[in-house]
Image (cartoon, rainbow, N blue to C red):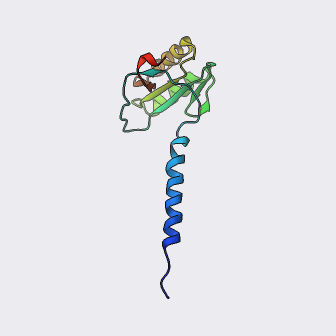
Amino acid sequence: MSEINVTPLVDVMLVLLIVFMVSAPLLTVGVPVELPRTEAGALEEQEEPLTISIRADGAVFLGEEPAPFETLPTRLAAIAENTPDRAVNVRADGRAPYGRVAQVMARLQAAGLSSVGLITDVAAPEDE
């Protein structure tokens, strides 16, 4: 028989496809926070927004890297200078201090980033 048997190749490719489909959603966000729940649905974005995460202890992350609160204005000003209309999503832990979240949002506004959204989990308010 001079033909190549492609059945094992197809089996391996399907297994790899399943592995990548399962692992891809786990690689999207690196900072673990417990999001508050709301009734609002998810928004459809066309450009990848900048994500600022605030943990329960008040630590701030710009993307996945830590951003000390003191250096946040200069970093945000640099981002706003390059892309002033860039969308920014704030992911704050539900147990994060309200004051810290308000301070971060004030710094975003001062830097000129006005398209700010808050990320929450979708659920009814009675689940608390």
- Which of 94/115 is in front? 94
Q: Residue at x 57, y 13 (%)?
A: 97
**Image x and y of residue 24, in percent:** 52, 46
In the rendered image, the vertical position of residue 24 relative to residue 68, given as above or below: below
Q: Quadrant of residue 117?
A: top left
In the rendered image, the vertical position of residue 102 relative to residue 116, given as above or below: above
**Image x and y of residue 2, in percent:** 49, 88
Q: Residue at x 58, y 36 (%)?
A: 30
Q: Residue at x 57, y 27 (%)?
A: 33
**Image x and y of residue 21, in percent:** 49, 50
Residue located farthest toward the bottom when viewing the structure as drawn: 1
Residue located farthest toward the top when viewing the structure as drawn: 99
In the rendered image, the vertical position of residue 112 relative to residue 11, given as above or below: above
- Which of 32/37 is in front? 37
Relative placement, left or right, of 86 versus 54 is left
- Which of 1/87 is in front? 1
Relative placement, left or right, of 122 versus 18 is left
Q: Residue at x 54, y 36 (%)?
A: 29
Q: Quadrant of residue 71?
A: top right
What count of labels does the image hold? 0
**Image x and y of residue 62, in percent:** 56, 30
